[in-house]
Image (cartoon, rainbow, N blue to C red):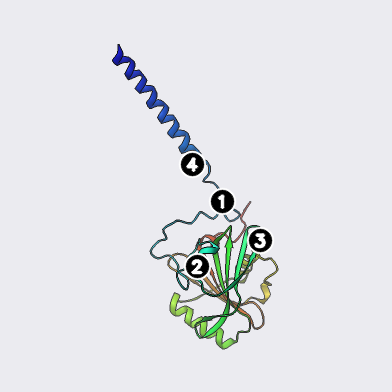
Amino acid sequence: MVKREMRRINACLLIILLAAFSVCQAAAEEVSGIRDLFQIPASTATPAPNAFRFRDGIRWGMNRQQVKALETATMTEKLMPKWSVMITDSEVTVSRFTAHLVFIFYEDQLLMIMYEFQNGSAEEYQYLTGALSAVYGDKHEAEPLKIKALMDAINPNKYVAEQIRQPSGWSTEDGTSVYQYFYSQNGFAITYVSPELDSRIYQTNGL
């Protein structure tokens, strides 16, 4: 009689434990929905071996403090409700030239990086096109409206589509996109875009 009662108690305990596990599993599934405007998944703790690395080991998904720990140049921060920007106070060395370096974060995760050459020449632009091709392979023609759509998500007044000239693009092994383009008469940029952001530039609701 005692043994039967113990078996019944053990069976009840097992049912309670299984029910509790199911509730925890369901709760974990409920919080894994859409993260933000671009539906960007949370970055993984361990990047893939072929993951994009910038300058001194900076990678996508890092927060502002992590980037500042690796980038030695002093920077000014501009904080917005969701987006935040860090720009170097002085120009940094890029190949044979210098430019301002800009880091762009969404909810404190690094998603885009820019070099801005505010007084660049055609010769500098062509040289850097060759340098980028030496690193990332053959270039392809980029779409000015895509570049504008990318920047409109952060600052709708930054670019005019008609002023985006000679846009070229490259892709890295992990899906990072690299764009080079003139955005004004003498200003041009090299922009690195994370795979998560580049694939979600356009708003597609209802299409």
Distance from the alpha carbon under mark 4 to that under mark 1: 14 Å
Distance from the alpha carbon under mark 2 to that under mark 3: 22 Å
Residue 88 x/y as whole percent: 59, 74
Mark 1, residue position: 35
Task: Using the image as rendered, state which of residue 42 and residue 140 is in the foreground.
Answer: 42
* Circle 1: residue type: Arg
Q: Judge whether 66 appears above or below 205 on screen.
A: below
Mark 2, residue position: 69
Residue 120 x/y as whole percent: 60, 84
Mark 3, residue position: 80
Label 2 neighbour load within 10 Å: few <14, some 14-19, many 20+: few
Residue sitting farthest toward the bottom:
123
The earlier-in-sequence mark between 2 and 3 is 2
Label 3 neighbour load within 10 Å: few <14, some 14-19, many 20+: few
Q: Judge whether 130 appears above or below 49 on screen.
A: below
Distance from the alpha carbon under mark 1 to that under mark 2: 26 Å
Determine whether, in the image, residue 85 is placed left or right of residue 45. Answer: right
Quarter of the rendering occupied by the N terminus = top left
Indicate which label's residue lies in the foreground, 4 or 3: 3
Label 3 element class: loop
Indicate which label's residue lies in the foreground, 4 or 2: 2
The earlier-in-sequence mark between 4 and 2 is 4
* Circle 3: residue type: Met
Residue 93 x/y as whole percent: 52, 81
What residue is drawn where x is 58% and y is 56%? 38
Residue 174 x/y as whole percent: 44, 65
